[in-house]
Image (spheres, rainbow, N blue to C red):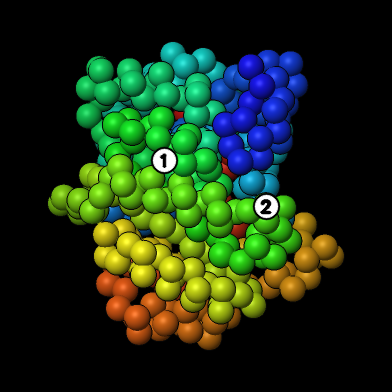
Amino acid sequence: MNCNICPRECGVDRKAEKGVCGCGENLRVSRAAPHFWEEPPISHKNGSGTVFFAGCNLGCVFCQNKEISRCETGKEITAERLFEIFKELKAQGVHNINLVTPTHYTEQIIPVLKRAKEERLGLPIVWNSGGYEKAETIKQLEGLVDIYLPDLKYIRPDSALRYSGAKDYFEYASEALDEMVRQCGNAVIHRGTMRRGVIVRHLVLPGHAEESKEIINYLHSRYGNRIYISIMNQYTPMEQVKTTHPEIYRTVTDAEYAEVVEFAKSIGVENAFVQDGDTAKESFIPPFDNSGV
């Protein structure tokens, strides 16, 4: 079957060749371990049980995880092994199972999520994605995913085209987000950990404070305080953009980030996470060394 699971619709037979995501048919995972650098109700005290999938359907030029995003590393595993990883992470005391960049493996992951429900794994499932997804794909996850943690990277087509080669990013991401909110409704946080709901992440890019404000205004106008917005200043200038995209070969200034946060406050955003200190460090990027795979 030709793959059209994501908006790229590359139509590739992934049994025979790799798709735009850089991956074939088999699940490929680069790391599975407790992760402590997610939003507070996701990581909480014991960490989030992250499963980092190799490959990506978006391919942002500034990607911090480029080591795995082109599916050049990682280990191929079966659906049976993925379920075992879920159980191993649970035994380590994590608060949830966090599927990182899973979109291009949706069809392979769904049977594993169904088994997790049937066998009462007992942990919330987090769908942690770049946001560039079809609403019809997200509909297939209803009843299987408890928490959606998508990015909303762009609202302007020119930005989406320049940095991700996806002029239609907002068109698809906004429709997918509507479906996520429809499924999960208002956020439920119990004893410091999220049990259900939607957190939308937005990474502020250098020189793009105005677009960030447009995005936050859109989110708050459409969803109010039904969702949480995570406003991130952790953009790390990677070497690959130095010559091709020099305008983003720097960190976000304190003034830029403060401008965006103050705007969010001014329009009444209450459910938000902000970052303090120097988060733009590569030390926040975990080693993708097949740990736990």
Q: Residue at x 56, y 23 (%)?
A: 27
The front one of 48 and 136 is 136
Q: Quadrant of residue 2?
A: top right
Q: Position of residue 276 (x, y in %)?
A: 42, 73
Q: Is residue 93 left or right of residue 148?
A: left
Q: Earlier in the sequence, mark 1 or mark 2?
A: 1
Q: Residue furthest right?
A: 243
Q: Residue at x 36, y 69 (%)?
A: 220
Q: Which residue is mark 1?
A: 127
Q: Position of residue 175 (x, y in %)?
A: 46, 50
Mark 1–mark 2 Cα distance, whole angstroms, equals 21 Å
Q: Which residue type carries mark 2?
A: Ala
Q: Is residue 284 left or right of residue 225?
A: right
Q: Secondary structure at mark 2?
A: loop
Kindly identify which numbered label has been placed on residue 166: 2
Q: Residue at x 41, y 18 (%)?
A: 111
How packed is label 2: few (under 14 Cα within 10 Å), some, or many (20 or more)? many
The N terminus lies in quadrant: top right
Residue 288 appears anywhere in the view: yes
